[in-house]
Image (cartoon, rainbow, N blue to C red):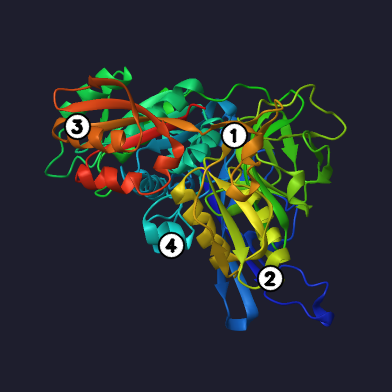
Amino acid sequence: MAATNICRLTIPLSVNTQQQNSQIHTKNFSSSSSFSFSCKPTSFLHSSSSITTSSTTLFSEGRKRHDNGLIVCKAVTTTTAAGAGAGGGGGTQSKDIDAGQDRLLKVPISNIRNFSIIAHIDHGKSTLADKLLQVTGTVPKREMKEQFLDNMDLERERGITIKLQAARMRYVFENEAYCLNLIDTPGHVDFSYEVSRSLAACEGALLVVDASQGVEAQTLANVYLAMENNLEIIVVLNKIDLPGAEPDRVSQEIEELLGLDCTDVIHCSAKEGIGINEILDAIVKKVPPPPETAEKPLRALIFDSYYDSYRGVIVYFRVIDGTIRKGDRVQFMASGKDYYADEIGVLSPKQLQVDELYAGEVGYLSASIRSVADARVGDTITQYGKKAANSLPGYKEATPMVFCGLFPVDADQFPELRDALEKLQLNDAALKFEPETSSAMGFGFRCGFLGLLHMEIVQERLEREYNLNLITTAPSVVYRVNCLNGDSVECSNPSALPDPGKRKSLEEPYVKIELLTPKEYIGSLMELTQDRRGEFKEMKYVTENRASIIYELPLAEMVGDFFDQLKSRSKGYASMEYSFVG
C-alpha cells in the first residue's frame, strides 16, 4: 500500500535585492519522508508539475495567499510501492491522481491508446468528445463549454467541425492508469482529408452513428478509411434518448451495410451522459496499444500544423519510433531543414510542456520555425545526428475539385493575401493556390478547394483571421484541352483556352456519386441527376426502405446548387458521398 504524507511549504512571494539569499522559512513535515527539490519551489505553481526521487513522488497544487506576501503550496507526497509500473500507473493511491487531474503522469507504452472519432455530419462527434473530456477530468467543470475542441468561431457558429483537434486524457481502469489520446475529426465530405490524416495517427476509431438516422453516406466513407488504416472499430449508437431512436434497426443496418459485428454495440447519449464510461472501458479493452519501438531511431509523423505569430510554426505529431526530448536537434526529412526543439508538450487539450515524448505518444513541437514550407503535413521528424533510414509514408496528396479566383479589394493587400494563404495552407494542406492576373481585378490567386463548403470556409477565415477584404469569382472546374499538335493543357479559366483552331478535343472532370435515400424519394433524385447530365450506374436496396443509387456526372454540374437541390427534393433525408473518377 502507498503511504501518503502531507507537508506544508511557505515561500516568499517576491524577492528584493536584500532578500536574494532568502531561504524557505517554514518547513513542517508530518513524517520523516525525505525528498530533494531539483528546481525552484515556484515550479509548484504549475498544476501539472511533478518531481520524482527514488522512492517518493511529489504532486503539488498551487495556492496563492496575498497576506504577508506569501504563497502557500499544498504538497502531497506519495510513497510508491516497490514494483509499481512505469510512472506509478495503477500503484498509486492519491485521490488527486485518481480524479484524473495529473494528465502528464507517465504510463507504459502498453497503457497508451490512440483513437479517433468518426461519423457523418451532425451525428454527435463533438458532443461525445466534450463528454469524454468531462468524465475523465481533463477539462475542469468551470472551463467546460459546448464544442470544447471546436475553437474556431466559424465552427461554433455553424455547429460543425472544420479542423481535427487532439486531446490527451487520463483514465483509470481496474486500478490501472491509462493515457487516452483522442483526435476529433470533421464529418463533412469536404473535410474528409482531415479525417484521413487523423486516422493515420491512431490504432482505433469510435464509429458514432445516430440511432434515429442510421447509416449515412459519410458513415460509409469514413468506415472505409478506417479499414484501409487497419483500425480497430468500436461501434457507438448515439442519441438513444430521442423518441425516434431505433437502435435495433440501426444495428442491423450497420451489420448489413458495413459488415461490422454489432453484438457488443454501445448505446449512448452524449448529450445526457449515458454510456460514456462503457465507451472509455471499450477503448481500453479493444483498441490495441502502439508497438513498443522506443529504442529505434526517432520517426514522428506530422499530422497537423499551424502558424503562431510569436512562436512560428507549431507542429502536431505522433511519435512512431524512438523518443524526442526538449532541446534535441531534429530534422524534417522532406525539406531537409533542421531545428532545435525549443518546446515539446502534449495537448490536453491546451498545450502543456513536457521534457520528452516516446513512441506511441501524440504531442506538439515548437522550434522557432519561420518558414511555412519547412514543416509540411505528412513530413517525418527525425534526429539530426541519428537519422532514420526511411521516412514514413505520409499522406496521399489532396486533389482540388473546385476552383475560384481570390482578389484583394485593395491592390496593396496582395502581399498580405499571399502570406495569409501560405499560413492557411500550413493549417489546411488541402488548399492549393497559384498567382493569377485579371485585367479587371488586378493581381490575385487562383485557388483550388475540395468542395463548395471548403471554399466558403477558407474565404471566411481569410477575411476574419487576416483582416482582408476579398472579391471572389464564380467557382469553376479544370478542363483538359487536347491540342492538334499532341499537347494537353489544363485550364480552369476560359481566358487561358487555346485558340479554337488549335484544339482537338475538350475533356471535363467526372465524379462518381452515391446517394443514400429513403425509397419514396428515388424518382425525384434520379430526375435531378439525369437533368445534370448524370449517367446511371447502379441501384440497390440496402434495407427494406432505403436505397443506394450510383451515378457518374460532370463535376461542373455539382459545383452549383446540386447539394441544395438534393436536400430539398428529399426533405433533408438523402445523403451524398462523391469521389473523383477522372
The answer to whether one can see residue 383 in this image is: yes
Is label 3 in a helix, a strand or a loop? helix
**Residue hosting label 4:** 143
Amino acid of disc 2 = Ala
In front: mark 4 or mark 2? 2
Q: Residues within 10 Å of mark 3 (few under 14, many from 20)?
A: many
Q: Hey, which quadrant is residue 507 in on the image?
A: top right
In front: mark 3 or mark 4? 3
**Residue hosting label 2:** 411
Spatial CA distance of label 1 from label 2 is: 31 Å
The answer to whether one can see residue 144 in this image is: no
- Residue 35 is situated, as x and y percent measured from the top left of the image, at 69, 49
**Residue hosting label 1:** 480
Q: Residues within 10 Å of mark 1 (few under 14, many from 20)?
A: some
In front: mark 1 or mark 4? 1
Amino acid of disc 1 = Arg
Is label 2 in a helix, a strand or a loop? helix
Q: Hey, which quadrant is residue 519 in on the image?
A: top left
**Residue hosting label 3:** 522
